[in-house]
Amino acid sequence: MSTMVGGGASAFSWTNSISSNLQLPQAHTLFGGESKRLTIWCVNANIDYGSSTQESKMIVSVTGATGFVGKRLVQRLHADKHQIRVLTRSRSKAQSIFPVKDFPGIVIAEEPEWRNCIEGSTAVVNLAGTPISTRWSPEIKKDIKQSRIRVTSKVVELINNSKDDARPKVLISATAVGYYGTSETQVFDELSPSGNDYLAEVCREWEAAALKVNKDVRLALIRIGVVLGKDGGALAKMIPLFMMFAGGPLGSGKQWFSWIHLDDLVDLIYEALSNPSYKGVINGTAPNPVRLGEMCEQLGSALGRPSWLPVPEIALKAVLGEGASVVLDGQKVIPTKAKELGFSFKYQYIKDALKSIMS
């Protein structure tokens, strides 16, 4: 199955065969005059899980693969020899992040080619969306919501329209702990109601789009907390403020900070891909949320900065604008479902997570 498309650029988070063997996708680029056309071959594969030597291998289509979480997930899937189909808006950006010499066999597809990639995939991971930890303008706020809903709706439509024997069996779709609203006193788990602020509204509509997936597809909605890692997310924007000031708390320091180490989040998504028990809403947060003041104290310690001068809210708002609310307005979220499922967190405590990241 192939699709001819133009070579130009064409997303806030997840089988049929003519052969009995799993066939690797191939891509060929055809040049003619000044125009460039690309043929993407997303070879569908019906895997006999009872007898195939490839029984543990998956074909995973990923939106948001070039983002902070997506990059690490693709690296993990590739290391374990799974087939990866990167569903992207920009082929050139994806190719620069996942060069074929380092990721042989990877398929990079822009939107016109998504249909052929999703059909025949074992699973889809939907992580696409405009970053939330950025300065908000009315246009950015609109894009934060619409980017998530549009891509999720597109993915769900393509899954639902796939042939029955070629439809992905699993959809892992990102959402966020912003669903619960903010509070300094309440404790939230997967059964808690939604809040009534902007991010809660975004998350409700984002999840509603995912919930329209075919009932035969196992759906896991991962409500993600603040993801901690070295190369992106809110932490990357907080560190310069800590170096400029003196490692003290942000704002009052009493706000709850529900966090997760990047490696644990990737492990959680990875487990959800293959474990049929992972379905419905699952909080993607570490078991021990902390007050923001404690988080800042631990971050100051990890950076070797004294924790005596508070970082004023105005400094963070100068960097993030309204987006500072992701850090400054918190909620205490507990990963009840993940613990019930027996998921093992490598980083249960903020001190260990930050030490790992800063080392």
Image: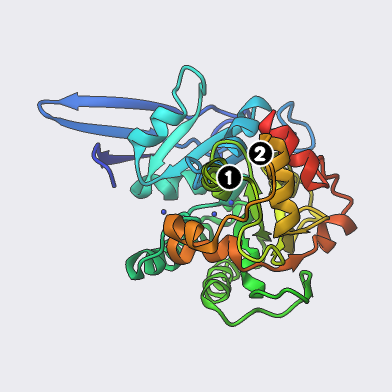
Image quadrant occupied by the C terminus: top right
Query: Which of the numbered marks, if any, corresponds to residue 138?
Result: none
Amino acid marked by disc 1: Phe
Percent position of residue 119, x then y = 51, 48
Quadrant position of residue 18 = top right
Residue 166 shown left or right of residue 149 in the figure = right
Tell me, yes or no, if residue 285 can be seen here.
Answer: no
Identify the element where label 1 is drawn. Answer: helix
Give the residue furthest to the front: 308
Amino acid marked by disc 2: Arg
Q: Residues within 10 Å of mark 1 (few under 14, many from 20)?
A: many
Q: How many marks?
A: 2
Residue drawn at x 62%, y 45% is 122
Quadrant position of residue 56 = top right
Query: Which of the numbered marks, if any, corresponds to residue 242?
Result: 1
Say above or below: 246 vs 40. below
Q: Residues within 10 Å of mark 2 (few under 14, many from 20)?
A: some
Percent position of residue 295, x then y = 72, 52
Residue drawn at x 80%, y 39% is 352
Q: Could you tell which of marks 2 and 1 lies nearer the N-terminus? A: 1
Residue in front for this viewpoint, 293 or 349: 293
| Mark 2 vs mark 1, CA separation in Å | 8 Å
The reply to whether the C-beta atoms of the residues labelled 2 and 1 are less than 8 Å apart is: yes
The residue identified by callout 2 is: 305
Residue drawn at x 11%, y 28% is 34
Residue 279 shown left or right of residue 173 in the figure = right
Identify the element where label 2 is drawn. Answer: loop
Percent position of residue 55, x then y = 74, 33
Residue in front for this viewpoint, 63 or 302: 302
Give the residue furthest to the left: 33
Percent position of residue 245, x then y = 56, 46
